[in-house]
Amino acid sequence: MFRRLISFMILFAVGAAAGCGGPENSFGRTWYIDGAGNLGYGTAGVPNGLKDKGYAGTVTNHRWSLTFNPALDQTLRFIAKGSGRGLGKDITKYLERNPQADANIIALSAGTGVAVWAVENMQPTHKINNLVLVGSSLSSKYDMRKALLNIKGKVYVYYASTDPVLDGPVRLLGTIDGTFDDSAGLVGLHGPGAGNGQVVNIGWTPRYRALGWTGGHADCVTRKFVAGEIAQRIVTPRSTEPGDREAVLLHDDALAARDHK
């Protein structure tokens, strides 16, 4: 009975989130997924930071928590997985209706599990553009091969070894996918599929302090950091000529190389 009630609540929450996206447009849509408990981190910083850099698409805040309790959301993992499946269907429907638009995802902490499961559950041949994972509580050994089939761009993983949530409570509760490995938000993603060039691990450096990310857990989704760093993964030139898509990918590669220096 309890699981049936929870399943109904998942469907209700996914439906409510899908209806909050605002008008569709040809500039695309970016879904933002908060962490466990849906405490509101990044819900203002992400859309405002993207807007500051000229993003003309719609930003949708995907709310997935049913308990509004971070510890329960982190351990009742079927909630995150169920929400991911529902979001994958929503993104597929969006791309069916808007074939020329780009879809992106930015996710924080346990929300990165929802994000990856959403991408895994998209229907071929629909693909998102880029996936940005920050403070990820997904296992660093997670198998990304299924998700990568549905991503035409890259997966950017911002991580910091000083993250107090991932190095504290998450070590006790386990990762959002149910392991006790190091979280990807501590060391990056290094599981199957991560070595093919699509997964770009970006470690914290002192230069990020000027943008407001001190190496903490949620200060990487503030307006300043999103505008100064994350937005470049989402706001890219629109393709108008056959060679433009290649130029965009080369631009992404150059940014990734810069971050590894």
Image (cartoon, rainbow, N blue to C red):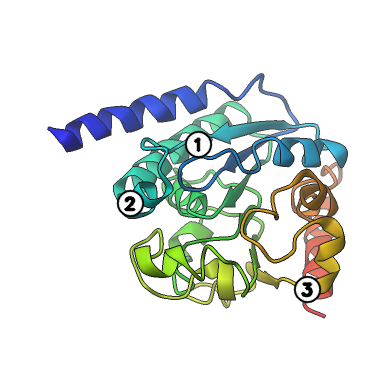
Front residue (pair 172, 88): 172
42 relative position to 37: left or right: right
Q: Which mark is residue 232?
A: none
N-terminal-most mark, 1 or 2: 2
Residue drawn at the location 69% of the way across and 49% of the way down? 221
Could you tell me if residue 11 is visible in this image?
yes
Reading the image, the residue beneath label 2 is 77
Figure quadrant of the N terminus: top left
Reading the image, the residue beneath label 3 is 205
Residue drawn at the location 77% of the way across and 69% of the way down? 256
Query: Is residue 110 depicted above or below 260 in this figure?
Result: above
Query: Does the CB distance between marks 3 and 2 fall below 8 Å?
Result: no
Query: Does the CB distance between marks 1 and 2 fall below 8 Å?
Result: no
Q: Residue furthest bottom?
A: 261
Element type at mark 2 = helix
Q: Mark 1 or mark 2: which is in front?
A: 2
Element type at mark 1 = helix
Front residue (pair 142, 123): 142
* Percent coordinates x, y for residue 174 in the rendering: 37, 65
